[in-house]
Amino acid sequence: MTPASELVAKTRDLVEQDFSNRLAALGQLVRIPGIAWDAFDPNELERSAEAVAKLFRDSGVFDEVEIKRASFEGVPGAPAVLASRKAKNGKPHVLLYAHHDVQPPGDPDLWETPAFEPTAKDGRIYGRGAADDKAGVIAHLSAIETLKSIAGGDFDLGISIFIEGEEEAGSRTFRQFLDENKEKLAADAIIVADSMNWSPEIPALTVSLRGVVALDFKIRTMEHAVHSGMFGGAIPDAMIPMIKVLASLHDEKGNVAISGLETYKFEDLPYTETNLRQDSSLLPEVSQIGDGGLMDRLWGKPSLTVIGMDVPSVATSSNTLQPSVSAALSLRIAPGQDPLRALEALKSHILAAVPFGAVVEFGNIETGKPFMADSSGWAAQMARNSLAAAFGNPPVDIGIGGSIPFIADLTEVFPDAQILVTGVEDSDSRAHSPNESINLLGLKNAMVAEALFLVGCNELKQD
Ligand SMILES: [Zn+2]
């Protein structure tokens, strides 16, 4: 299934020929500030969806290109672009996902070029959405038009396009959209082009996402606050057991100390302590935490953060024993871990760690499933071969330490589909931050890879 070298050369030529047009289309999208947050003009999202729909309509590949929205709890979501073309002669159907909405620009003073003015500089295009994820939209467009050039307009492969309009705002109506358009979206393989490659020369497949368990809890020791000078030393205020519970969550080295949590092993990648310090702004005096490889700690092992506490502020504090305090915890869980079992392990740990018989009350709970790609299917194999041929280097497996919640929806609605998380970003893309940009060599290679993948799917012999 490795693409022939003549095909790779031809594909690259076609991508090269059209590249300046692709960049013009990308620039046109970057100029539209489509942001799916209430504080921003929703008309821009309409313009953005229209512009995307036009690109796919003009490709002449689809039976139908529509702008659609779903509703959640009576509130309509942002406009998405849905296009489809049926498979013929027993060939597979592929769904290509990206999103056209972007993050807000943030402080304009932090941008070196205007956020919504696409600017070419040093082999990159700068602008909000130039990488995340308008480059993903353009990569899909390039891939299908290249397939059309190679296989002719009457090709057999089934293709659906789903360009979401509210990914950055939490994909509120994503599940409804899938349910309402299930027939048009159903596919054998789904490409989610919203992640990254390792570098412009080294491709990557994102094989896992950590899940999350968020939990808040209150610790109580008294009915009401009392004077610390009169009772301190004989009874515990709520802060003492809270501190002891929180201190028990990590061991001496900073590993999560909750028993029963799973881990997943990654291959080491060229990512050094220096890279980590730079990317995270870790102070020079401060050490890393945790055992094992860096990739394991970032992607494959659980991590636990105290993300909030309700305690008296320093400014309003007085000499009082506090009767109750609360904390909010966020536990990232390994790919493969069941969130409900992780939640039970966390709760059991807290109950076992709380001293003096202090009362623990659990509050809000949120869970998100982790994702682990099944790399054994034909689509994953074909994607790896296409990436290797396009970039000139074999792909590395990467994880994401956070979650993409809608991936869980995709796996639930389409349990038989092979999901491939690819992307166009590189490590300097600064998605969500000022000075977002895309490396043009990496983008071109990603376009060639996706085109090779579609050509491969179109030639696949079904048995
Ligand atoms: Zn994105």
Image: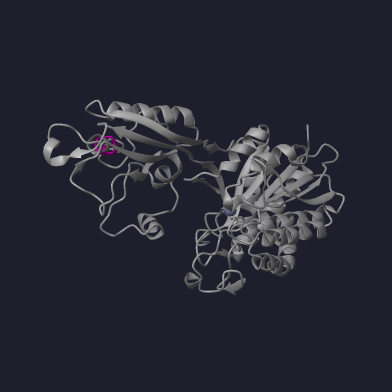
Percent across and percent down for residue 434 are: 50, 66
Percent across and percent down for residue 427 are: 50, 58
- 146 with respect to 387 (left or right): right
- 299 with respect to 54 (left or right): left
Percent across and percent down for residue 185 are: 74, 41
Of all residues shown, which one is farthest toward the right?
154
Q: Residue at x 60, y 53 (%)?
A: 423
Up/down of 411 relative to 100, above or below = above
Residue 381 seen in render: no
Up/down of 111 relative to 359, above or below = below
Q: Which stretch appears magenta?
A: 243-247
Image quadrant occupied by the C terminus: top right
Image quadrant occupied by the N terminus: top right
Q: Quadrant of residue 311?
A: top left
Q: Residue at x 20, y 48 (%)?
A: 318
Q: Nearer the viewer, residue 79 or 131?
A: 79
Q: Quadrant of residue 27?
A: bottom right
Q: Nearer the viewer, residue 334 or 10?
A: 334
